Image (cartoon, helix red, strand yellow):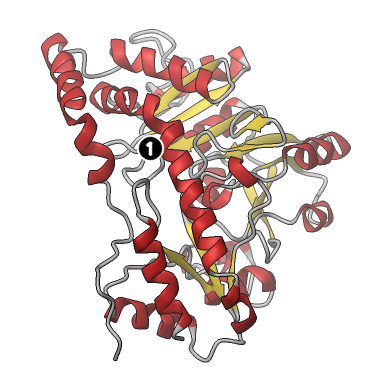
Amino acid sequence: MIVSSQTVPFVDLTLQHQPIQADIEQAIAAVVQRGDFILGKTLKEFEAEFAEASGAKYGVGVASGTDAIALGLQACGITQGDDVLVPANTFIATVMGVIQAGATPILVDCDPHTALIDLNLAAKAITPRTKAILPVHLYGQMVSPTALLDFAQAHNLIIFEDAAQAHLAQREGYKAGSVGMAAAFSFYPSKNLGAFGNGGMLITSNEEVAQRVHTLRNYGAPRKYYHTEVGKNSRLDTLQAAILQVKLPHLSQWNQLRNQAGQIYDQGLKLGEDKGIIPIKNLSQEGHVYHLYVIRINKGVSMSRDQVQAFLGERGIQTGIHYPIPCHLQPAYKSLGYQLGDFPQAEILCEQILSLPMYPGITREQITCVVEQLSLI
């Protein structure tokens, strides 16, 4: 067995955190000294800064990306009896957020080359109850904004973006989160902009939507002890906002490093495409922020995807699968009424996709190591 000369981690967050550790510690200490741990000064500052960076007017910090979807959809007027178009190929939180908002997710298959929602199929899935489309900017690449806007206008639908993996991604002159009525972001630690725990944000340029999420996230109270609707306790902690505020000015550079790493992978894997090792296609050029770098192991490869993953693991190369089971086949969502075969492209992708090491600071040598090991398959 040929063993790799180095271990390549799937993610290495220390490369981001070490150079700014002192700034993070100082920001945390300032919050501790003020004692405004809930809805504090730094949270308000970060909400405004992240919204502006993403091309929106308002930001509302919440406890998770899932809550950003659920509360954001409610604030956009989505409620019980409404249908929302959602890609079948996404993390389950997208579907979960729609259900928590009281609506019904209508799943749509994906484009096998980009893994993004197929808008032609979405048009066929529209029902009289369809009120919104929830595109997922998967792996760090946006769904085409112009195509989305044309689609929404043609069918009179709200666009609500799931941008949990696409912080500051760009395409066709738009930033992720600036296309629709509102957008949801996650600050899970491994995201391009990650907290030191859970967190999320709703961004919008609609003042009414922003104000309603402000109310919904805080027990349905527009002001203390006055509750106008049934909300929940879902607030981004001030400590987490302080950490994210320190990291935000570095995000563009980190995204550029991810994009450069993606280009190195693309170049190195060109020869592997004939063998059946095919990267998910980048249609956004420099606007792709590569939260994940994903390849497909198709039928032309002598090994299955799981065998390839084991092969790389034995050689010190860590990988992931995002995601191994499509939403419609998850046991918790049998009630949606879907079955095996309903979304063939998503089902095939779930059997083929493999996420390779990707993070700001991954070296050309590490990427070359991964590519060389894949060439041995």
Residue 277 at what x, y percent from top left?
56, 76
Query: Callout 1: 10 Å neighbours few (<14), some, many (20+)?
Result: many
- Which quarter of the figure is the N terminus placed in? bottom left
The disc labelled 1 sits on which kind of residue? Answer: Phe
Q: Is residue 333 visible?
A: no
Residue 301 at what x, y percent from top left?
55, 87
Q: Is residue 243 left or right of residue 98?
A: left
Query: Disc 1 designates what residue?
Result: 187
Residue that lies at the very extreme toward the right in this rendered image: 154
Q: Is residue 362 above or below residue 333?
A: above
Q: Is residue 195 left or right of residue 108?
A: left
Q: Residue at x 28, y 13 (%)?
A: 40
Say which of 75 and 362 sits in front.
Answer: 362
Residue 328 at what x, y percent from top left?
58, 65
- Give the tally of numbered discs: 1
Q: Is residue 1 left or right of residue 45?
A: left
Q: Residue at x 16, y 19 (%)?
A: 26
Quadrant position of residue 318: bottom left
Q: Residue at x 28, y 61 (%)?
A: 9
Q: Residue at x 77, y 53 (%)?
A: 122
